[in-house]
Amino acid sequence: MLCLDDFYKDGDDPTLPRSGGQVNWESPQAWDAAAAVQTIALLLRNGKADVPVYAIGADRRVATRTVSLNGSPIFVAEGIFAAEIAQECRRLGLLAEAYALRRPRWATFVRRLLRDLAERRKAPDLLFRRGVALLRTEPAVLARQTGLGCRPAGGRAVLRGAARLAATATATTAGTAAATGTAADDGVRAEIAGTEPGAGPVIPGASRTPA
């Protein structure tokens, strides 16, 4: 899985959006969309890519890890700003499907708060206030994600769609290899599906990526 939240900008980046002297981490401008798209393309072309590891509590990237497809015909990537790259992935021929994960708003609030508290992302009172704010804006966020080309769907529908794409990609890859006698990449798919509750997951699934 490719975690798109690891592409947040560092806290001292001068291009970060600010409001009232504070960084607005809910803005897509706090996130490096170009680097995320580039990494997806590299994964499709090379089968692996080095990606950052972001520590939200420290507001910066703290390490690098290698993501490898290990021969898999698909991979999953998710993040709260995934919808922001749906159109660009589609333009580049990288997109198979895009989803905006839709769940009951209070369920999203509880799941997000429990996760953030467990990971000690910020002070508890700040996490609670942020959760309430996101609860109120969630309908508008979903509408924006839909406008960016994502299909609103529940978790089970996203999983069914991912399984269908995986089966299609596997069958296409097998057919190509049998016809050519080589491990051609025509059937490779990059899939971006959201597991972040209430976020705007995208499933880019790619057709052939040029060398």
Image (tube, helix red, strand yellow):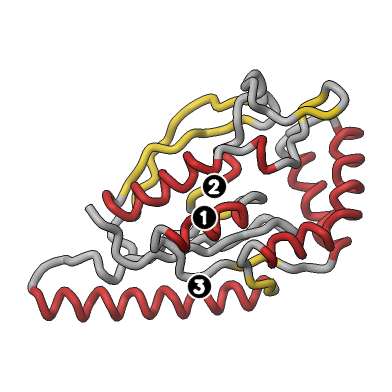
Asked if disc 2 and disc 1 are in contact, CB closer than 8 Å, the reply is: yes
Alpha carbon separation for disc pair 1 and 3: 12 Å
Which residue corresponds to the image point at 64% horizontal and 72% vertical from the top-left? Answer: 151
- Point out residue 11 in the picture as x, y percentages from the top left corner: 66, 23
Q: Is residue 27 above or below residue 202?
A: above
Alpha carbon separation for disc pair 3 and 2: 17 Å
Q: Secondary structure at mark 1?
A: strand
Residue 169: image quadrant is bottom left
- Point out residue 110 in the picture as x, y percentages from the top left corner: 84, 54
Label 2 sits on residue: 3
Residue 181: image quadrant is bottom left
- Point out residue 68 in the picture as x, y percentages from the top left corner: 35, 49
- Who comes first in sequence, dot 1 or dot 3? 1
**Of 75 and 148, which appears nearest the observer?**
148
Which residue corresponds to the image point at 67% horizontal and 50% vertical from the top-left? Answer: 80
**Of 24 and 157, which appears nearest the observer?**
24
Q: Is residue 98 above or below residue 36?
A: below
Label 1 sits on residue: 77
Horizontal side of residue 130 vs 39, given as left or right: right
Label 3 sits on residue: 162
- Point out residue 27 in the picture as x, y percentages from the top left corner: 73, 41
Asked if disc 1 and disc 3 are in contact, CB closer than 8 Å, the reply is: no
Asked if disc 3 and disc 2 are in contact, CB closer than 8 Å, the reply is: no
Name of the residue lying farthest toward the front: 91
Q: Secondary structure at mark 3?
A: helix
**Of 116 and 97, which appears nearest the observer?**
97
**Total marks in image:** 3
- Who comes first in sequence, dot 2 or dot 1? 2
